[in-house]
Image (spheres, rainbow, N blue to C red):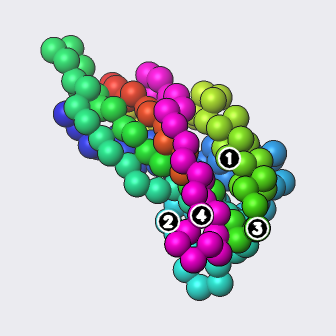
Amino acid sequence: MTYALSAALQKAVYGALSGDAALTALVGAHIFDAPPVGAIPALYVSLGPERARDRSDKTARGARHDFVVSVVTDAAGFQQAKDVAGAVSDVLAQPLAPLERGRVVALRFLRAQAKRDEAGQQRRIDLTFRALLDDD
């Protein structure tokens, strides 16, 4: 197993999201690889938790990475968040740029969960994707 591809995957996902015109038209520059600090934007996208598992075999090292991309808004309803979540899905349905190390064998959407925070002030959609990576 290797976790050595995680940073390269995160960089490629972040680059794809922040470089997409349709997504940035919806959220501007409010795409983060960590939750924002200080003044919180009314609508933003953030890379979230990741879980990696071994996907090695006798011929190659690799890993399966399940990672979350979150859309967070303080809007009263979910429509705006769903529009942004759809744009995130569209971006990640396209091939990523080559990784700095390793390669993406497959990247697909797994699931989404839409929820309100306990105080009812924010709406959040957590999109989970799975990347299969080989360490070439």
Give the CA distance from mark 2 to mark 4. 20 Å
Q: Which disc is residue 116 wearing?
A: 4
Discs 4/1, front = 4
Q: Residues within 10 Å of mark 1 (few under 14, many from 20)?
A: many
Mark 2 element type: loop
Give the CA distance from mark 4 to mark 1. 15 Å
Residue pointed to by mark 1: 85
Residue pointed to by mark 2: 34
On whether residue 60 falls in the magenta region, the answer is no
| Segment tinted magenta in the rendering | 104-125
On whether residue 118 falls in the magenta region, the answer is yes
Whether the residues at callouts 2 and 4 have beta carbons within 8 Å, the answer is: no
Closest to the observer, 82 or 1: 82
Residue pointed to by mark 3: 76
Q: Residues within 10 Å of mark 3 (few under 14, many from 20)?
A: few
Residue at 81 percent across and 45 percent down: it is 22
Mark 3 element type: loop
Estimate the x, y position of residue 2 in percent, counting from the top left.
23, 37
Quarter of the picture containing the C terminus is: top left
